[in-house]
Image (cartoon, rainbow, N blue to C red):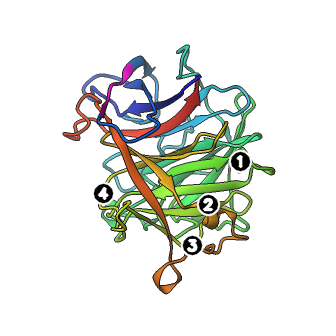
Amino acid sequence: MALYGYTIGEDSNPNTSGNQLPVYRFLIPSAPTGSITPTLVGTVNLTSTATPRIDLEGLATNPTTGRVSAVNEARVSGTTTAIDPSVIVVNNVDVPFAPATTSPTRTPSDLRRFGFESGADFNRSALYNISGNPSTENGVPVGSSLYRITTATPGAISLVAAAPTAAQRQGTQPTNSQFADGLAIDNLNPGNTRALASDFSTRDGDGAQLYKVDLLTGQLSAPIALRTPSGQALNVNGDSGLSFTNFGSQRLIGWLETGAVYEITGYQDELAASGLGLGSAGGANGAGFATATLLGNVNLPNAVSGAIDYEGFTIVNE
């Protein structure tokens, strides 16, 4: 058995009808290495969609079945007002590649997701999707919201919030003022409710960070700053993915849309702390921190140039 990462590209040919989204698989190294060679698993074809372009930005591995699912982004790329009313979940995009789509029922019926970026992960009862907006340039506030998707077919999607407002339900306001677009749920420990979210973007005015996520209330903690092994701030800027290995010796792996793979350590005290406060690893001014070590770069077509963004990320033990 070995750990494999999966990622999915944005629409590689926006001039055609529908969406063609390539899925790649690559070995997760056990220690820092140079370049990592991926293998094309298949291409997801979304030929009938509610908008001209839908990207499957959230990738997640079901701990019960071991299969990978993908969730589409919430808002139409390049617009400030159009909110995609449909939620598309594409199952079985791993090996063996056999994608099938389902559209969960929105509960309540006026539910619209917030944000332009998306991350996802399963616990043992549902698929969770964090959806956020990193920049006011998009015409909506900076922030993020958490959604729960039941695993039945087609299932139902609901906003995770104690008392959501009409604007939060309809996707024009976030439930959190912090932006995050990667999600990892800890399924090795009892309860399956411990989770972290990631933000490697500087467009929201800060650096690379993690947040604790409360899966019961949808709230994010104060930030956990990411540092390099030498103690410097992790200087990156891009959409992120995040995944726990959730089997064997637990590892937390971060992902940058250009193909950079990071192992994150030192988060353990933060995640173990009660509630949404930070743990005992606090630094200056009480801010928590963790260390991100570059494991390698996956050589994905047109990733470094930015012609294709690879935003979704998950790990499978195969």
Compared to residue 225, the image places residue 184 above or below, namely above
Q: What element carries label 1?
A: loop
Q: Residues within 10 Å of mark 3 (few under 14, many from 20)?
A: some
Question: Is there CB contact under 8 Å for labels 2 and 4?
Answer: no
Q: What stretch is highlighted in magenta?
A: 35-39
Which residue is tagged 1?
107
Which residue does the image show at 33% across and 22% down from the upper left?
A: 17
Alpha-carbon distance for marks 2 and 4?
22 Å
Q: Nearer the viewer, residue 163 or 283?
A: 283
Query: Which dot, 3 or 4, sits closer to the camera?
Result: 3
Mark 3–mark 4 Cα distance, whole angstroms, equals 22 Å
- Which of the 4 image quadrants contains residue 243? top right
Check disc 4 and report the residue beneath it. Answer: 236
Q: How far apart are marks 4 and 1 (CA)?
A: 37 Å
Binning the other alpha carbons within 10 Å of mark 4 as few (below 14), some (14 to 19) or many (20 upward) gives few
Q: What residue type is labelled 4?
A: Val
Q: Is mark 2 on a helix, strand or loop?
A: helix
Residue mark closest to the camera, 2 vs 4: 2
Mark 3: secondary structure: loop
Which mark is first along the chain, 4 or 3?
4
Q: Name the residue under label 2.
A: 268
Q: How far apart are marks 1 and 2 (CA)?
A: 35 Å
Mark closer to the chain start, 3 or 2: 2
* Residue type indicated by callout 3: Ala
Per the image, the residue denoted by label 3 is: 281
